[in-house]
Amino acid sequence: MAESLPCPEGELHRTYYTLAALRARGWTASMVRDLLGEPDAQGRSPFYGAAAPTRMFAIGRVESAEGTVEFARALAAAARRSAAAREAAARRRKAVLDRITTEPVEVPRLSRGELAEEAVRHRNRRDQERVWHRPGHIPDPAAVATTDAATMARWQVDYLRHRLTRYDALMDGLYGGAGRTEAAQLLRARLHDAIARAYPELAAECRRQLAGR
């Protein structure tokens, strides 16, 4: 059974490695499990008393394990897996960006009157839905006749962008990180460009929204 110790930052850390320190030395969770097993001590931080105990491994035992053939093999295998994962992620990123670049974007074509009515209806529906997320919010329905031109343009672009959300599926396969951010920016630019081409009177609002991002 591991010894339970307080966890000051001085003497204790000159005797043991924490899991974070092991990760910095190239250890993975499976390597710790297979080559070290149970921790030699468990410490608690004086600053985070409610946190889970820190698993700590004796420096001598860790460094002895690092000198074994088993560790060298496991380290090499982990490096190969990491490289393969990076390569796969790069391929996914390129495939997604290629799709976003080439996919035709079909913008709904409506008359000015229809677009105004749909945009206001969409805005009012979203305003009504805020009641579920913001206690105390009181819906304030808008009407086409009393909405100024700049506000109407914003709502129209918002509505059309909502109608194009199916294109968000083009980013499937990207899970966070810079790749997804780049893909989202490219997709947003393509959708706003398509809206501006379909409705030239909304081009300035499309540029404004893109600049605001």
Image (cartoon, grey):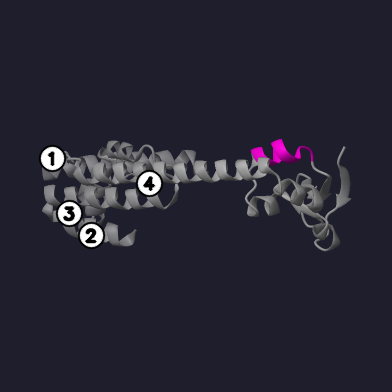
Alpha-carbon distance for marks 2 and 1?
A: 21 Å
* Disc with the residue nearer the chain's start (4 vs 2): 4
* Disc with the residue nearer the chain's start (2 vs 1): 1
Alpha-carbon distance for marks 1 and 3?
A: 13 Å
Q: Amino acid at mark 4?
A: Ala
Residue at left 57%, top 44%? 76
Taking the image as shown, residue 43 lies to the left or right of residue 153, namely: right
Residue 190, image x, y percentages:
22, 49
Please, what secondary structure does the residue beneath circle 1 have? loop
Instruction: Point out the residue furthest to the front here.
Output: 69
* Disc with the residue nearer the chain's start (2 vs 3): 3
Q: Is residue 83 visible?
A: yes
Q: Nearer the viewer, residue 27 or 197?
A: 27
Please, what secondary structure does the residue beneath circle 2 have? helix
Looking at the image, is mark 2 or mark 3 nearer the viewer? 2
Q: Amino acid at mark 3?
A: Leu
| 36 within the magenta span | yes
* Disc with the residue nearer the chain's start (1 vs 3): 1
Q: Which residues are magenta?
A: 30-38
Taking the image as shown, residue 185 lies to the left or right of residue 26, namely: left
Q: Residues at badges 1 and 3 in contact (C-beta under 8 Å)? A: no
* Disc with the residue nearer the chain's start (3 vs 4): 4
Looking at the image, is mark 4 or mark 2 nearer the viewer? 4
Say which residue label 4 marks: 90
Q: Quadrant of the C terminus?
A: bottom left
Q: Residues at badges 3 and 4 in contact (C-beta under 8 Å)? A: no
Say which residue label 3 marks: 202
Q: Amino acid at mark 2?
A: Arg
